[in-house]
């Protein structure tokens, strides 16, 4: 079996890919997709520690269930906002949504 | 890489290939033929009876015809997504058969999360349908795909709520354990237990399952008169055959799951009908071609499989009957039924089933 | 190279390569499909970590619902994109070193330490569904109920925000 460090490495790589996506994607839905990647990376970390952990319990998996729930709720509301943006501005480029910039 | 791992993987692939071939040839081909003949009989016409004796070779002939058709990809369509979409709809429809128990030891893999696996896998097909509608570069396909996805996602909730009642009554998620929990008589089947709550759960399962499998009265997504057959209008040849086979697999899965969850699975209704049937015993072992085979065990498994198959076919006949009888509902009536009728009833059913188990 | 090592390597490769494709592909629909593939990879990694119920829930919710939601949103917000508009913002050359620095920090300071944990995860004999359900209903009951409130708020909020305003209606 792999040591836990392998799973933590995968989780770190996934998180940084998501971070890069949030910072560079122009499409608003693309940013939300990158946020889902980051949440998945955090979940993987939690479940890895719950599996290898010194205490035999499922706290990490319970936490991961809640993270999945909140991620679903956040994706729904975020995408509703994006659709609303499109109905008002006819595009979803986050570069051009800067009316309130000083 | 140790060779044991490769042998295990090879065995799993072999078992999967056998199951898929078996289901395709033994189950699907007669079922498609049976559907056409039975529906024709209910509509006072004859149905296919020219190709082969009594029209039995009609389905292989249709399959050959579809294989010969030209594979058209519409201009402006996304080639990769257009090609992968039927695969994403076909594969999950057959992945469900991994957990369905056909007999006491005839399960491909009895996962301990059986029913959740079934829900998870059938939800992958929704992506395939949206992709198919999008990649066709056709606004009617896209609208059909949106409606289809809305229907499938909405009816997943009452379906899972209806699944929960046998889970609560049996106390386990594994399908083989649920079947074993219904051992005994007809009265032990979940559809007759819990003072009618099992029957209510079966009713909800039937309604939600009909919508998930796109059968009448909920077959808006693929009816020929609705949006020009919906999301698969641009598909021809083998890709269309994949969609078609996936739809029939979904119908048989609906029946097989209903039989497993509510009607006792591979168990006979009365104990004298299970092996040994009417007390007729067969020899324990036979020597065929120099090897001794456990003939009694094989016969027992064959009897169990025959009961499972017979019950599933009866249920498929009932579905065909419904298909020939009921009219199609409108899209808004469809969504109304899901969100305002089936989900509240399903929730109340689940709570009452919980009370029943707690008070027992 | 045990079977589980091979499985881990394959699943980790699928997950990471799909994630890279998600953030770099210009066609946003294909990007969403690779996101679904990366979710399936993560579900496979959960199975390796003996969290089989969580893996099924991950496929059911992420692949079955959230990906469909993303695809709907993408198709409803399609814009006429000319081929010249690049898909990345102007912060690309700042974001790439920052992400790599974050990656280096996370790996050297967190992923390469040795933790006081078991060398291998021990499989629960009864499976994880029952202990998970007991944990959700006994010690973690309050977050469980609050999560249902949050879902209700998200449901109502999403419907209200995405609804088209009827002209002249003042409620």
Image (cartoon, coloured by chain):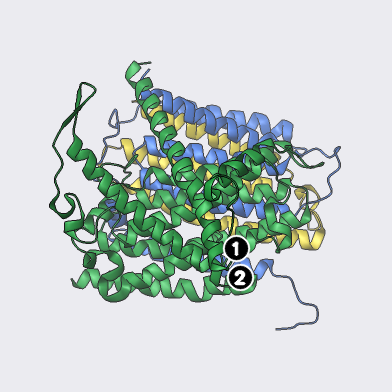
Chain colours: A yellow, B green, C blue
Which residue does the image show at 47% across and 71% down from the upper left?
B343
- Label 2 close to label 1 by CB (< 8 Å): yes
Q: Is residue B163 left or right of residue C106?
A: left
Which residue does the image show at 53% across and 33% down from the upper left?
C15
Determine the secondary structure under disc 2: loop
Q: Does any portion of residue A67 appear in the rendered image? A: no
- Residue B279 is situated, as x and y percent measured from the top left of the image, at 13, 52
- Residue C25 is situated, as x and y percent measured from the top left of the image, at 70, 35
Task: List the residue tagged with mark 2.
Answer: B328
Which residue does the image show at 49% across and 30% down from the upper left?
C12
- Residue A2 is situated, as x and y percent measured from the top left of the image, at 36, 25
Q: Does any portion of residue A70 appear in the rendered image? A: yes
Which class describes the residues within 10 Å of circle 1: few (<14), some (14-19), or many (20+)?
many
Question: What chain letter is assigned to the residue under label 1?
Answer: B
Question: What chain letter is assigned to the residue under label 2?
Answer: B
Task: List the residue tagged with mark 1.
Answer: B219
Tell me: residue B289, above or below residue B59.
Answer: above
The one nearer the camera, B212 or A78, is: B212
Q: Quadrant of the C terminus of chain C?
A: bottom right
Q: Is residue B71 left or right of residue B61?
A: right
User: In the image, are marks 2 and 1 on the same chain?
Assistant: yes
Which class describes the residues within 10 Å of circle 2: few (<14), some (14-19), or many (20+)?
some
What whole-number distance in Å separates the C-alpha atoms at marks 2 and 1?
Answer: 7 Å
């Amino acid at each position: 079996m792999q040591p836990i460090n392998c799973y933590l490495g995968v989780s770190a790589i996934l998180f940084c890919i998501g971070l890069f996506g949030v910072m560079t994607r122009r499409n608003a839905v693309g940013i939300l997709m990158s946020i889902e990647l980051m949440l998945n990376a955090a979940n993987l970390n939690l479940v890895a520690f719950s599996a290898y952990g010194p205490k035999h319990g499922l706290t990490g998996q319970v936490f991961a269930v809640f993270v999945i729930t909140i991620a679903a709720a956040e994706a729904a509301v975020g995408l509703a906002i994006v659709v609303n943006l499109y109905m008002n501005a006819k595009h979803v480029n986050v570069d051009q949504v800067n009316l309130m910039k000083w | 890489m140790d060779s044991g791992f490769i042998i295990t993987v090879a065995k799993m692939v072999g078992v999967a290939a056998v199951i898929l071939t078996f289901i395709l040839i033994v189950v699907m081909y007669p079922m498609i033929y049976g559907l056409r003949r039975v529906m024709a009989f209910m509509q006072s016409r004859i149905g296919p009876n020219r190709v082969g004796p009594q029209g039995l070779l009609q389905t292989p002939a249709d399959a050959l015809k579809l294989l010969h058709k030209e594979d058209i990809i519409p201009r402006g369509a996304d080639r990769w997504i257009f090609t992968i979409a039927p695969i994403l709809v076909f594969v999950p429809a057959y992945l469900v058969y991994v957990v369905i128990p056909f007999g006491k030891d005839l399960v491909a893999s009895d996962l301990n999360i059986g029913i959740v696996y079934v829900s998870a896998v059938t939800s992958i097909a929704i992506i395939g349908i949206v992709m198919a509608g999008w990649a066709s570069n056709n606004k009617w396909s896209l609208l059909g795909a949106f409606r289809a996805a809305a229907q499938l996602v909405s009816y997943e909730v009452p379906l899972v709520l209806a699944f929960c009642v046998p889970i609560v009554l049996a106390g386990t998620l594994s399908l083989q354990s649920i079947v074993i929990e219904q051992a005994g008589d007809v009265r032990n089947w979940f559809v007759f237990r819990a003072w009618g709550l099992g029957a209510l759960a079966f009713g909800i399962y039937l309604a939600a399952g009909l919508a998930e499998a796109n059968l009448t009265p909920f077959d808006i997504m693929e009816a020929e008169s609705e949006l020009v057959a919906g999301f698969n209008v641009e598909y021809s040849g083998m890709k269309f055959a994949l969609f078609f086979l996936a739809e029939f697999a979904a119908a048989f899965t609906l029946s097989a799951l209903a039989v497993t969850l509510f009607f006792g699975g591979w168990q006979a209704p009365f104990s004298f009908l299970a092996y040994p049937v009417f007390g007729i015993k067969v020899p324990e072992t036979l020597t065929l071609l120099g090897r001794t085979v456990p003939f009694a065990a094989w016969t027992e498994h064959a009897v169990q499989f025959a009961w499972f198959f017979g019950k599933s076919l009866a249920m498929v006949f009932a579905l065909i009957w419904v298909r020939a009888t009921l009219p199609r509902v409108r899209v808004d009536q469809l969504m109304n039924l899901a969100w305002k009728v089936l989900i509240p009833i399903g929730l109340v059913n689940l709570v009452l089933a919980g009370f029943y188990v707690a008070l027992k | 190279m045990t079977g589980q090592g091979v499985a881990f390597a394959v699943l980790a490769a699928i997950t990471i390569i799909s994630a890279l494709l998600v953030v770099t592909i210009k066609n946003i629909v294909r990007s969403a499909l690779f996101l679904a593939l990366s979710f399936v990879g993560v579900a496979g990694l959960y199975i390796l970590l003996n969290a089989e119920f969580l893996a099924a829930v991950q496929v059911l919710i992420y692949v079955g619902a959230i990906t469909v939601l993303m695809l709907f949103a993408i198709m409803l917000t399609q814009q006429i994109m000319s081929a010249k508009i690049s898909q990345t913002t102007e912060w690309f050359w700042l974001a790439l070193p920052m992400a790599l620095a974050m990656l280096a920090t996370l790996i050297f300071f967190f992923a390469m330490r040795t933790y006081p944990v078991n060398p291998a995860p021990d499989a629960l004999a009864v499976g994880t569904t029952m202990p998970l359900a007991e944990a959700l209903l006994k010690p973690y009951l309050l977050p469980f109920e609050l999560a249902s409130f949050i879902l209700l708020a998200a449901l109502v909020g999403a419907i209200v925000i995405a609804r088209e305003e009827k002209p002249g209606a003042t409620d």
